[in-house]
Amino acid sequence: MPVHRYRAIEDVSPPPSLDPRDPATAGKALDHVEAMTAGLPPLFAAGVYRYGSIEAAGADRERALLARMRRLWATRRRLWATRRRLWAMRRRLRAARGGDRR
């Protein structure tokens, strides 16, 4: 794949416009959403839930959403910690080899 370099932002060609009525556009959006939520568990466990009021249902939904966000954040923190350890190992290896870049 060729690499294009530009001197100014004005030289960059605009992205292709997508027709909102085209079914391929919806497919691309759904693919993006699936990729972003692939590692997340479902918001609610399978089953039927009964609530005494709209407020109780909203409170349960908010609690489930916050728990999901905390799990996602914990997963991302573990991933970042792993990346930091790998970067530190690379730096140590480069320093041991005399500081060469690759």
Image (cartoon, rainbow, N blue to C red):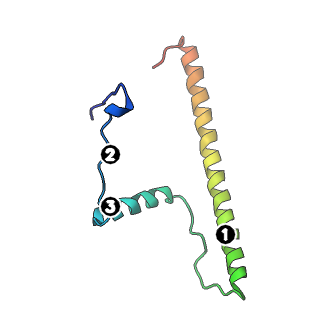
Identify which residue is drawn at 45% across, 61% down: 34
Residue located beneath label 2 in the image: 15
Q: CA distance from mark 3 to mark 2?
A: 14 Å
Name the quarter where the C terminus is drawn: top left
Can you name the residue that lies furthest to the top here? 98
- The label nearer to you, 1 versus 2, is 2
Q: CA distance from mark 1 to mark 3?
A: 31 Å
- The label nearer to you, 3 versus 2, is 2
Above or below 58: residue 31: above
Residue 69 is situated, as x and y percent measured from the top left of the image, at: 64, 59
Residue 87 is situated, as x and y percent measured from the top left of the image, at: 57, 30
Above or below 38: residue 42: below
Which mark, by number, is residue 79? none
Residue 68 left/right relative to 17? right
- What secondary structure is found at the residue carrying circle 1? helix
Q: For residue 10, which quarter of the picture?
A: top left
- What secondary structure is found at the residue carrying circle 3? helix
Residue located beneath label 1 in the image: 64
Q: CA distance from mark 1 to mark 2?
A: 38 Å
Name the quarter where the N terminus is drawn: top left
- What secondary structure is found at the residue carrying circle 2? loop
Q: For residue 85, which quarter of the picture?
A: top right
Residue located beneath label 3 in the image: 25
Earlier in the chain: of badge 3 and badge 2, it is 2
| Residue type marked 2 | Pro
How crowded pointer 1 is (Cα within 10 Å; few <14, some 14-19, many 20+) is rated as some
Q: Nearer the viewer, residue 51 or 38?
A: 51
| Residue type marked 3 | Thr
